């Protein structure tokens, strides 16, 4: 284990898996059948940080659509079917992602905190033979609130501590995110934050203490140096 870095929590879509365009396409297919349009600009500007239920709830609020909980559940199921069809069409991991995950898992406990559905995450990870490397996976529905609430990262952090039996400190645990919503969530849980520019440019990743192009550019030595540095004054800690 490196001297300062104690654990890593990855976002999934946009960090490990290049699946955000597939999520958008699946939503577009689903909503098109309902006579609704979701543009790429709207998706990336307003909705990318939500889980599926949260996105549809926000869309309904924004457009004043009278969608019931039952209707939203039906749309989520339909979108999930569309996504699985798209995922099976080819590999979706970012270049260098699998290699970094494997290297990280040798050194420290690793986890996922994502708004994606668990079966979607596991299908991709199992196909890449990566699922067994993660100490815990927090997925959509595992917390009462989704990102940008700190709840997903707080739960991932607590599970890491419990399941690894290590006295992990939040300030020595790194979150890797591709959106400002995810960074806000990780900051609220007191984690150190790295942004990847796979979905947004660097200037839209406010709150990231380090920004890289993707996991293929990241090293454990760089994360160790980050955890050795002082915690920014604006960072919040859970205790």
Image (cartoon, helix red, strand yellow):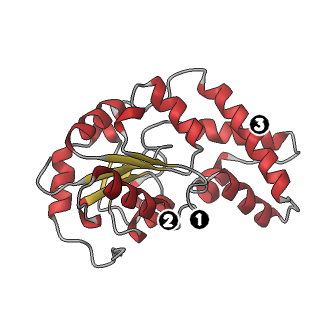
Q: Which residue is drawn at 35% across and 31% down?
A: 98
How far apart are the two marked residues, 1 and 2, measured between alpha carbons? 6 Å
Q: Where is residue 137 in the image (x, y as percent from the top left)?
A: 46, 46
Q: Earlier in the sequence, mark 1 or mark 3?
A: 3
Contact, mark 1 vs mark 3 (Cβ under 8 Å): no
Residue at image mark 3: 29
From the viewer's side, name the closer residue of 126 and 199. 126
Q: Which of marks 2 and 3 is in front?
A: 2
Residue at image mark 1: 145
Q: Is residue 194 above or below residue 116?
A: below
Quadrant holding the C terminus: bottom left
Q: Where is residue 27 in the image (x, y as percent from the top left)?
A: 72, 42
Contact, mark 2 vs mark 3 (Cβ under 8 Å): no
Q: Earlier in the sequence, mark 2 or mark 3?
A: 3
Q: Position of residue 216 (x, y in %)?
A: 30, 36
How far apart are the two marked residues, 2 and 3, measured between alpha carbons? 30 Å
């Amino acid at each position: 284990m490196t001297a300062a870095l104690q654990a890593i929590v990855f976002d999934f879509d946009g960090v490990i898996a290049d699946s955000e365009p597939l999520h958008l396409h699946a939503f577009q297919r689903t909503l098109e059948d309902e006579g609704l349009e979701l543009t790429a600009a709207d998706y990336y500007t307003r909705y990318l940080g939500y889980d599926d239920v949260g996105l549809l709830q926000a869309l309904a609020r924004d457009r004043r659509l009278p969608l019931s909980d039952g209707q939203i559940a039906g749309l989520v199921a339909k979108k999930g079917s569309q996504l699985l069809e798209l995922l099976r069409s080819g590999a979706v991991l970012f270049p260098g992602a699998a290699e970094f995950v494997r290297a990280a898992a040798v050194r420290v406990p690793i986890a996922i905190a994502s708004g994606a559905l668990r079966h979607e995450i596991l299908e991709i990870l199992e196909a890449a033979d990566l699922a067994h490397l993660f100490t815990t996976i927090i997925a959509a529905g595992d917390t009462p609130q989704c990102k940008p609430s700190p709840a997903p990262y707080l739960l991932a952090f607590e599970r890491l501590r419990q399941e690894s039996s290590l006295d992990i400190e939040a300030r020595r645990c790194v979150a890797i995110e591709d959106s400002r919503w995810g960074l806000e969530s990780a900051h609220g849980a007191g984690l150190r934050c790295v942004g990847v520019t796979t979905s947004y440019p660097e200037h839209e990743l406010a709150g990231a203490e380090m920004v890289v192009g993707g996991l293929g550019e990241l090293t454990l030595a760089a994360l160790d140096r980050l955890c050795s540095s002082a915690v920014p004054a604006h960072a919040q800690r859970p205790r």
